[in-house]
Amino acid sequence: MKKKMMMMMKGNGSKPSLNSLISSLGDSIRELIELRSTLRMDGDVSITGLIAIIASFQSVELQIQAIKDLLRQRKEAIPNGKLSRFFYSFTLFNIEMTVSEIETLQRIISPYAEFYSNMARVLHPELFSDDTNTCLIQEDANNGISPEVAVVVVPSPTEEIQQNNQLQNEPVKKPSLNPLWNVKARQTAVALVKEDGKELEFLRRLTMNLFVIVSAAVFLLISVAYLPLLNDLYWSTLKSLTPPAGIVADLLVTNGTIFTSDSSLPFADSMAIRNGRILKVGSFATLKAFIGDGTMEVNLEGKIVVPGLIDSHVHLISGGLQMAQVGLRGVSQKDEFCKMVKDAVQNAKEGSWILGGGWNNDFWGGELPSASWIDEISPHNPVWLVRMDGHMALANSLAVKIAGVTSLTEDPVGGTIMRMPSGEPTGLLIDAAMELVTPWVKEISVDERREALFRASKYALTRGVTTVIDLGRYFPGTTDELSWKDFQDVYLYADSSKKMMIRTCLFFPITTWSRLLDLKLQKGSVLSEWLYLGGVKAFIDGSLGSNSALFYEEYIDTPNNYGLEVMDPEKLSNFTMAADKSGLQVAIHAIGDKANDMILDMYESVAAANGDRDRRFRIEHAQHLAPGSANRFGQLHIVASVQPDHLLDDADSVAKKLGSERAVKESYLFQSLLNGNALLALGSDWPVADINPLHSIRTAVKRIPPKWDHAWIPSERISFTDALIAQTISAARAAFLDHHLGSLSPGKLADFVILSTNSWDEFSKEVSASVLATYVGGNQLYP
């Protein structure tokens, strides 16, 4: 055993030696310091200089990660026996110490690429436009580089994909060149230059697959030796955040209380903006030097500013569509419900579908609607009305007939057809059963969906929302093609025609994970400053209101009903394993306590199988948690994407469904999640609930349902600051957007909201402010 371990420590002679690896890292660090010292900071920083330093930082980051991976492999290679562990105790100690040092080194290095990339965005926005080649190709021509050669940027989500793609890193001739150095990709690049007919490889950095056996003790000495040097470089770089002399701000926001969501400077009174990004935040005295010709000034007159609010869970186009349909949100009586449908029928052509949604039977006492409510008023128009949670819908008898649903139709897997004692359908369909009707519903045109995006975006801006995480129109009972159609027909169109108004991060059905992976490998995650590719979404259960959320114990109001598994758990696990292995972020809907535990278990198993990485698994809703489950979110580094305003709808009904004891112990455990160090992100689930972040924050802080005079489960109230953080920087971090937005930090996108109040104390206590103005990229888009 000892001989075998010694051979492992020596490694394979065909692979880089320890000395060469350390030498390479040392050379890269010296290169960074040299580049940093020569980089001009006078307002005319060269594009080439910025590119070089960004690429060099990225190379060092990859070298560090490769060393961490190899140290982990070496640790795993040590036998598990007690005697072996004792024998190799010194080796283990050295490995642990080295991992600690390398992680410190990584924390120091990581902000660099972001800092210089942000500097590039502020000083040279042309680097990030579609016309990047205009300046770069000319510069290359001056250096004798042929414009026929394109750079291949290869993301590395997994080792397997890297190995396959290494064979594809060849020059690619294209009639229309991509940007030669696309900084926003922030990937390791391989550039091949044609010179006199001879290919010369001039830049190739380490990849994640270096199988090098590193001596922990020796590397520890080397890393310690370089740490002071890097620390000096890091802090001198941070101190140089003051932009170069002569830089003029496009916009200066002054004389207010600016909450930044940045722990390094939580509050300021002024903020300078240039090229749509934050130039600097601080006191007016430190920012007035940026006033010049063309600088616009906004005097806040004491008003409060917060970062652009992020809604962590919406169905944006669905919300926009529903705004033009029969809106049943808030309806509290059967007669009112029927009247609104009748009015819609009278204004529609005979035979056309009547679409709508937002109804909540709990608002009129709990009785479920049926086709008999609306059949007489809609004899010639099929009707389809979706419950507020999207997990149940009402069809009139004509729609049921068109879809061919009868007493003989069996319940589909993951769905339920509600029936009368005779076996005939009542018109209500739950989860997967909705798919029996949805194929027959008229297809919504491209123009209608584009108008829906425009309508929804304008509405979101009135609420201070500048970024949304869009989970799409994919629900149980719908086709997984809807999200992709909306991406192709609506989002790409709006982005290319410059009609986007809020930033949108898109998630797609988990069944299409390979399709998303291909797109990300081709385009990257950042399609533009408006459009981002997120991850994949799935469902494990239904909803509480539809009695289809999955629980350990039965529903009190429907005995022998424990809820539904809307997707086969084994199939879901396989999809999750594959998507995660490819490097995609996974988000899964879970409402009931059993559903949440199933996903927590599955995530833990997948992470163990696929290895350590920053994956940020998400559970959407995390609404009812069994004892101890809240702590597992933090332990497993799982994002809790929650919607506070849902508790306002559930407070009156949950005890009737689960019983008072269960309801109090496991419902909306926001503070318990924070106590367990979970990353909490707030959202609305619009159009299930209204898109209104300030109201969501108030609900998370107060937890007082309508017509109540006290908080529901007061121990689970969270602080105002925690709630605001969860609606800004934590929401950004939960979707890997925190390098771009979420806080008012230098270099980030200048998205912010001006509120109606002048008192921070009053705002933090009552959360009663309204939105006066919403700015996106430094431009006022509302009002």
Image (cartoon, rainbow, N blue to C red):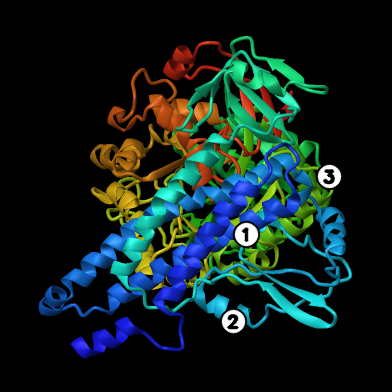
Check disc 3 and give the amino acid type: Lys
Name which of mark 3 and mark 1 comes first in the sequence.
1
Please tell me the numbered disc located at residue 164.
2
Name which of mark 1 and mark 2 comes first in the sequence.
1
Q: Residue at x 48, y 40 (%)?
A: 235
Q: Position of residue 77 (x, y in %)?
A: 28, 79
Q: Position of residue 195 (x, y in %)?
A: 82, 77
Callout 2 crowding tier (Cα within 10 Å): few <14, some 14–19, many ≥20? few
Callout 1 crowding tier (Cα within 10 Å): few <14, some 14–19, many ≥20? many
Q: Nearer the viewer, residue 397 or 23?
A: 23
Which residue carries the number 3 mark? 349
Real-space Cα separation, disc 2 to disc 3, in angstroms: 57 Å
Name which of mark 2 and mark 3 comes first in the sequence.
2
Which residue carries the number 1 mark? 55
Residue 22 to residue 430: above or below: below
The residue mark sitting in front, 1 or 2, is 1
The residue mark sitting in front, 2 or 3, is 2
* Lateral position of residue 217 relative to residue 498, left or right: left
Residue 714 lies in quadrant: top left
Q: Could you tell me which secondary element the residue under label 3 belongs to? A: loop
The residue mark sitting in front, 3 or 1, is 1
Q: Could you tell me which secondary element the residue under label 1 belongs to? A: helix
Check disc 2 and give the amino acid type: Asn
